[in-house]
Image (spheres, grey):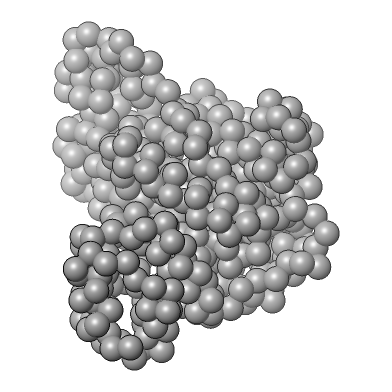
Amino acid sequence: MRPQEIIAKKRDGQELSRQEINAFVRGVTDEIWADYQTSALLMAIFLKGFSLEEQNNLTKAMLESGDTIDFSDIDAPKADKHSTGGVGDKTSLVIAPMVAACGVFVPMISGRGLGHTGGTLDKLESIDGYDVNLSIERFKQIVKKCGFAMAGQTKKLVPADRKLYALRDVTATVESIPLIVSSIMSKKLAEGIDALILDVKTGSGAFMPKSSDAKKLAAALVKTGNAFGVKTEAVISDMNQPLGKFVGNALEVFECIKILRGEIDPQMLPTLELSIELAARMLVLCGIEKTVQSAKLEVQSSLESGAALEKFRNNIEFQCGNPGVCDEPESLLDKNLIKIQIKAETAGFITKIDTTAVGEAVSEIGGGRIKVDDKIDFAVGFECVKKLGDKIKVDEALGIVFCRKKSQANLIRQKVVDAYKISDEKPNEKFQLIKEII
């Protein structure tokens, strides 16, 4: 089955058979297909689309391109959570210990940040010594011992995805829903889970800003998850402003530990609200609780009792990090940083935030990657002082930049100021964090 025949078939809008899709994925994994042939088919898929059957066949072929993780020896439900990414999106660090404290095992394969979005692995590595590069065997051991583990994708786990994602990134085919679904779901299905909750972001800081596109993606992800026997649900959440109080790796871990300790200030409440919503739905999907409301009470109890914090402490120990951050979260904050206020140039009400611009600003001072091989400064970041709907005066702080040098703050000051639209009238529409359940 020659590559050009498969490419031509999809170019002409025809449906690819399971055998043709298998040949494509095998060709990519074994490097039989040249990059230009793979790129040509990716563009044909982007332009002509995939049916649900093609989407599921691609997911299955990618899943079977490498190793999978077998948790059948754990006689308890296994579940995971995946987010499509955003600015200040740190809920995994709260959800995993909460859900584990409620009796669900959470094997979480996570990623790194790129562009304006942060990555869970980068956040975790801001904890001194924390090891995210685990073998599958070590990953399984930690899940069994403390209820959850968070690690990166190994070379043997869905290898086809690594190759395809790299090519999608440079061929402008990232936004294809079938390609997104197969990428996300092949990795999640490889974890051997029973249930999956998806946090699909929409808004100015989201991968898919339009609500209609986010709904389409959520529906496609849910259909494929359920087709593979994994109970799947999606929450569409708003990313029209950074989530919670902080943006930046160590600062976000600090926020999560403060939440787990019950030391929550008002700016952290959205992080807690979304974490509880997603965690509760994981418990319902796993059959631990019958209703979302009762599950929320169970999750809240794991916080109030300290059980979730203890789970996180145990996980840090097993993954070779310093568990002392659970007792002294301030130790995560670099004392050599300087804090510079970014002040409003006009008075009024905040009616719009370019959340992507805020994320990009943090990346520009070293808090994220512009290119895959960029080094990250885990300590730098941004504190979100003002949110949508807030009233602000001239020279009042919109936020605070945590940086190494004043020149870094000067570099991004105007970009952050311009990200906040300030109007005379207060917005009529109240910010709604959780938009819809799919």
Taking 10 as reference, is 143 left or right? right
Question: Measured along the vertical axis of the image, is residue 77 above or below residue 210?
Answer: below
Q: Quadrant of residue 194?
A: bottom right
Mark yes or no: residue 29 visible: no
On the image, the x and y values in percent for residue 77 come to 75, 53
On the image, the x and y values in percent for residue 260 come to 65, 38
Taking 145 as reference, is 112 left or right? left
Mark yes or no: residue 57 visible: yes
Q: Residue at x 63, y 57 (%)?
A: 229
Q: Quadrant of residue 171?
A: bottom left
Q: Residue at x 25, y 35 (%)?
A: 354
What quarter of the picture does the N terminus occupy? bottom left
On the image, the x and y values in percent for residue 433 come to 45, 28
Residue nearest the viewer, comparing 45 with 136? 45
Query: Looking at the image, how many numbered discs can be counted on the residues?
Result: 0
Q: Residue at x 71, y 29 (%)?
A: 291
Taking 10 as reference, is 146 left or right? right
